[in-house]
Image (cartoon, rainbow, N blue to C red):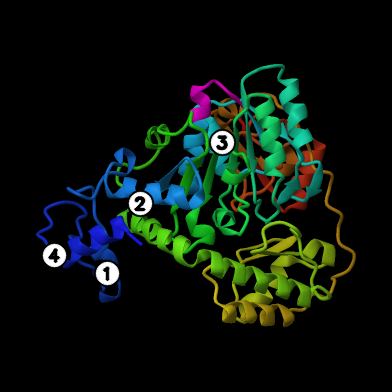
């Protein structure tokens, strides 16, 4: 398969040219182990194209990615899904839309809303899964959109969430479009979903705009991402939106990684994805008597262990795994998240199963019940609060104060309290339950 970015970089490096341009390392590595990487690290020289004004090798590679994902247009990001989220929301700001957002959001969403001055209407999960996740229905969004009484809006959703739960995107898309609202999906953990026999990707299910973190579930370097659109109204506008926030010096190593990933997606991803999904399902079945898994029916490659339901602490389980050389994606008191990928080898999946079999999941006694999740009262906009003069105080002294800074944990979670929201007793109780002892509030 043609890989235009890789081919250009390869030919340039082989030619051993006189590099009278950036980067300052001039293609030479300070250590021999990284010689190949430094040789391929370029800037926008003649023939190398330009990410935000692509019309050459980058445009050719992106066009191939769009074909593979089944989108109207796909563009590359060297700023992760964060840059893609900023671009999606910028397009909504241009159209004067309020954002109707599921509460399960990444901090990148909140930061972008601060920068853009976007107004948010929150939709809370109708079925809670603690701080990490939540289940939403199309009706939840229909009620929120109806309450806006015709105000221009868009819907913003994270799916899969951090534990691997997936939303009913098709139904939510139908509701969104009925109200004239574009559907935006943070699909950071779901790039691989386009390559099942029947696509499970948001582009196939009715989303208008969608971001994927290529590095999370595909064999790409960290920070690589895609921004997709299925809507003709946004095709041709993605680059301009990304250019508002992205660096004018994108990494050619990352672009090379995305370009080579196209070859993987076309030639072997589907076969490997099918194989690793079967391995994951077999592992779950064999461990079901020992382990309670979360995200059943969601993304098959998220091996999420519901330690809260088992009466044990996920952080201690992660420590046991690390003792035998296995490192989890995430560990908290309620859950452990282990990620497989289409790049996985059968031996690695088998080793993971052995590691889990060796863990002690004995309950530690009656677990403390998670508090009812708060729905704090909004006192001012996210932007006004985040940019206000603030101070950090103990949670014990925060009653009646207004949250200031955007301090949502990363990995993404259901934010307990967000900039501009009033801190009541229930909010304080929830913060303490999750081990949060300080909070940033507007200074009075």
Pointer 3 or 2: first along the chain: 2
Res 235 seen here: yes
| Along the line of sight, the residue nearer the viewer: 39 or 436 | 39
Q: How far across and down, in percent of the image, does residue 282 sit?
A: 72, 74
Q: Residue at x 73, y 66 (%)?
A: 314
Nearest to the eye among marks 2 and 4: give it: 2
Q: How far across and down, in percent of the image, does residue 233 sit?
A: 48, 28
The answer to whether residue 118 is left or right of residue 305 is: left
Which residue does the numbered mark 2 point to in the structure image? 61
Distance, label 1 to label 2, CA atoms, is 21 Å
Pointer 2 or 4: first along the chain: 4
Distance, label 1 to label 3, CA atoms, is 39 Å
How crowded pointer 2 is (Cα within 10 Å; few <14, some 14-19, many 20+) is rated as many
Q: Residue at x 25, y 46 (%)?
A: 49
Q: Is residue 286 above or below residue 11?
A: below
Pointer 4 or 3: first along the chain: 4
Which residue does the numbered mark 4 point to in the structure image? 15
Question: On the image, which quarter does residue 144 sit in?
Answer: top right
Nearest to the eye among marks 1 and 3: give it: 3
Pointer 1 or 2: first along the chain: 1
Magenta span = 91-98
Q: Secondary structure at mark 3?
A: loop
Q: Are marks 1 and 2 in contact (CB under 8 Å)?
A: no
Mark number displayed over residue 36: 1
Nearest to the eye among marks 1 and 4: give it: 4
How crowded pointer 4 is (Cα within 10 Å; few <14, some 14-19, many 20+) is rated as few
The residue positioned farthest toward the left in the image shown: 18
Question: On the image, which quarter does residue 428 sit in?
Answer: top right
Q: Are marks 3 and 2 in contact (CB under 8 Å)?
A: no
Q: Secondary structure at mark 4?
A: loop
Which residue does the numbered mark 3 point to in the structure image? 208
């Amino acid at each position: 398969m043609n890989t235009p970015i890789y081919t250009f970089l390869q030919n340039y490096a082989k030619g051993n040219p006189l590099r009278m341009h950036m980067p300052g390392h001039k293609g030479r590595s300070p250590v021999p182990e990284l010689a190949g990487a430094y040789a391929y690290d370029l800037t926008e020289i003649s023939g190398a194209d330009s990410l935000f004004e692509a019309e050459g090798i980058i445009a050719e590679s992106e066009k191939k990615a769009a074909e593979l994902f089944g989108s109207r247009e796909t563009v590359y990001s060297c700023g992760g899904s964060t840059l893609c989220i900023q671009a999606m929301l910028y397009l909504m700001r241009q159209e004067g839309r309020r954002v109707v957002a599921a509460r399960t959001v990444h901090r990148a969403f909140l930061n972008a809303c601060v920068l853009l001055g976007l107004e948010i209407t929150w939709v809370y999960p109708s079925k809670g899964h603690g701080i990490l996740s939540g289940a939403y229905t199309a009706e939840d969004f229909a009620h929120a959109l109806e309450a806006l009484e015709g105000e221009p809006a868009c819907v913003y959703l994270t799916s899969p969430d951090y534990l691997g739960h997936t939303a009913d995107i098709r139904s939510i898309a139908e509701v969104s479009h009925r109200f004239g609202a574009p559907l935006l999906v943070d699909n950071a953990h779901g790039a691989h979903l386009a390559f099942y026999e029947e696509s499970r990707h948001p582009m196939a299910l009715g989303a208008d705009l969608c971001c994927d973190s290529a590095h999370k579930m595909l064999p790409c370097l960290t920070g690589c991402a895609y921004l997709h659109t299925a809507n003709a109204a946004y095709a041709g506008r993605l680059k301009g939106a990304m250019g508002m926030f992205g660096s004018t010096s994108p990494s050619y190593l990352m672009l090379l990684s995305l370009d080579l990933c196209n070859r993987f997606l076309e030639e072997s991803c589907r076969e490997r994805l099918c194989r690793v999904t079967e391995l994951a399902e077999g592992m779950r079945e064999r461990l079901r008597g020992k382990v309670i898994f979360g995200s059943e029916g969601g993304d098959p490659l998220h091996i999420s262990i519901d330690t809260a339901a088992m009466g044990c602490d996920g952080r201690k389980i992660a420590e046991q795994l690390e003792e035998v050389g296995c490192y989890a994606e995430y560990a908290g008191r309620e859950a452990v998240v282990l990620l497989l990928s289409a790049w996985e080898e059968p031996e690695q999946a088998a080793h993971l199963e052995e590691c889990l079999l060796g863990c002690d999941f004995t309950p530690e006694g009656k677990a403390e019940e998670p508090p009812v999740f708060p729905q704090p009262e909004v006192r001012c906009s996210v932007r006004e609060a985040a940019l206000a003069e603030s101070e950090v105080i103990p949670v014990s002294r925060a009653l009646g104060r207004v949250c200031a800074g955007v301090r949502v944990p990363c990995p993404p979670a259901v934010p307990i309290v967000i900039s501009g929201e009033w801190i009541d007793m229930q909010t304080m109780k929830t913060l303490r339950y999750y081990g949060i002892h300080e909070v940033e509030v507007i200074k009075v």
